[in-house]
Image: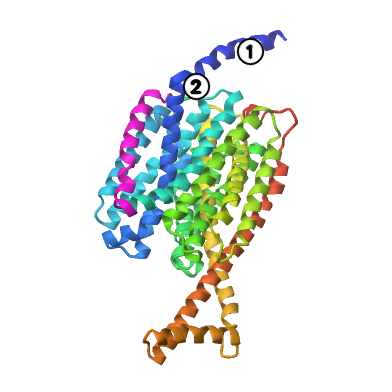
Amino acid sequence: MEATAEVNVLPKKEHEEAYPTGAAKWILVITAISCAVLELIDTTVVNVSLREISGNIGATTTEIAWVITAYGIANVIVIPLSGMLSNLFGRRIYFTASVIIFTFSSLMCGLSANLWTLVFWRFIQGIGGGGLLSTAQSIILGAFPPKETSKGMAIYGVGIIIGPTVGPVLGGYITDNFSWHWIFFINVPIGTIAAILASRHVTNLPGVTRPDKIDWWGIVFLIIGIGSLQYVLEEGGINDWFESDEIIFFFITAMVGLVAFVIRELSIDYPAVNLRLYRSFNLAMGNILNVIVGLILTVSVFIFPLFTQVSLGWTATQTGAFMIPGALATAVGMILVSKLLSKDTNPKIMMLTGLSFTSTFLILLSFSGPDSSERNFFWPFILRGVGMAFMMMPTLTLAVAGLKGKDLAQATGLSNMLRQLGGAIGVALINIYLDNQNADVRSNMVTNISDYSSLSSERINTFSQLFSSAGYSTDEATKAANMVMDGLVTKQQMLICYDHVFLMLGLIVLLCAPVMLLIKYKKGQKLEAVSDH
């Protein structure tokens, strides 16, 4: 008892010194979350502007994809290295430098006059952005004492949801009303203010010293492995996957690089990325769920705009604006989950509740028809927003539970990398599935359009008569009628395919349940109070 009393007295003083309070605390948190949101917005803000950018700088559809690919590759390489780089340079210098790199490269992206200059600066922007995301998470978590960890997670979680959701609508609005250059220029004033605040308020991690040795080989293997894997995921669809020698080469390179990386990191005492953290069963399970959460979040944001614009005729701005209430529902859900976690509610129950909400949302979307409107999707999206909060926040909390200092920085880097990879894997798999579904559904539908089908013949004849009455010749009217019929078939085909995708995703989400049930949790145990690993 005496020993326990002595231990409790000393850490209390250190504890009070370790956590910022008052205005300084909230300036720090706002600066960090603003930078994280900026980074996440820039992962999606460019997507809706690619057509305008390619037309302006004279790039082909295939070439312009490198604007997204370059950012994603740089991002996913730097994110897991953020912990090591933060220890090497000090968290204050590293975070401030990342903000400056991100801001300056944003300016240069906006000033780029040709494709490869833009691709180069997007790669540099991805390097700066990768440093922002993980470091921002560790800064936010480090600003709250253990009993308030769930509050920090809620703040960070809201940023993760808002960034990818706001990105497309912001990009569409700026491109429609100004020019594509401003999707980059808008980062400059925000980044400048953030850099000034970061240099003044971000602190170095206590007790962390500069490493004596740097794991250069580990860094090289990580760059080769993760960079090649991200390239395969980004470019595989364009290059017909394993029909391409280029994709096969980079896939083999990725596997060799990743195996060499794992062997290297587990065999030395000064790893660039501490994979030994995965000795914690709960941390490993949390990151498996992180991959799935990244997949669900990214794919739902990716597939719904395509569905509404291709099948229902919505505009990009209309689609983006519609998704905002769902993001706000997630923010409300994060606050609710934060309060439940602080009251020692079983996180497994919350995660299973979120899983059921998210799965229900996707299954409801699978019943969409050609007459579906915003009214049909509003409440399912609210359900999805709350469900993602209940799935994401306990998962994020679990993934870094009990970690402090450099271990926390390493864990957040790994968590964010896996979530990014989960999203990239999800988009790649959905594109493959959509391609196969389109072929199968179309082949089944066109068999019903022939001279022997009275329904299709009547429809084509009606269209022909309309074109004939408009002055078309008989041949032209028949050709135009067939083109209209083909367009209707394509639209219906796409609608059915997207419905199949939503149903498949809804069922895949249910497969997360066994992973959630495997998580170790004892009644009365606070999730944020798990001992150091």
Amino acid bearing label 1: Asn
> How far, Cα to Cα, is label 1 from label 2?
19 Å
User: Which label's residue is closer to the chain start, 1 or 2?
Assistant: 1
User: Image quarter for residue 530?
Assistant: top right
Mark 2 belongs to which amino acid?
Answer: Gly
Which one is nearer the viewer's eye here, 455 or 65? Answer: 455
- Residue 8 badge: 1
What element does badge 2 sit on? loop
- Mark 2: give few (<14), some (14-19) or many (20+) Cα within 10 Å: few
The residue at 27%/46% (across/down) is 108
Q: Main secondary structure of the magenta part?
A: helix
Q: Label 2 belongs to which residue?
A: 207
- Judge from the rendering whether residue 111 lies leftward or rightward of residue 503; answer left or right: left
Badge count: 2
Is residue 267 left or right of 24 when viewed as pictured? Answer: right
**Residue 21 magenta-drawn?**
no
Observer-side mark, 1 or 2, equals: 1
Q: Which segment did they paint magenta? A: 176-203
* Residue under the point 39% across and 88% down: 476
Q: Which of the pair 356/400 is nearer the observer?
A: 356
Q: Residue at x 26, y 51 (%)?
A: 112
- Picture quarter with the C terminus: top right
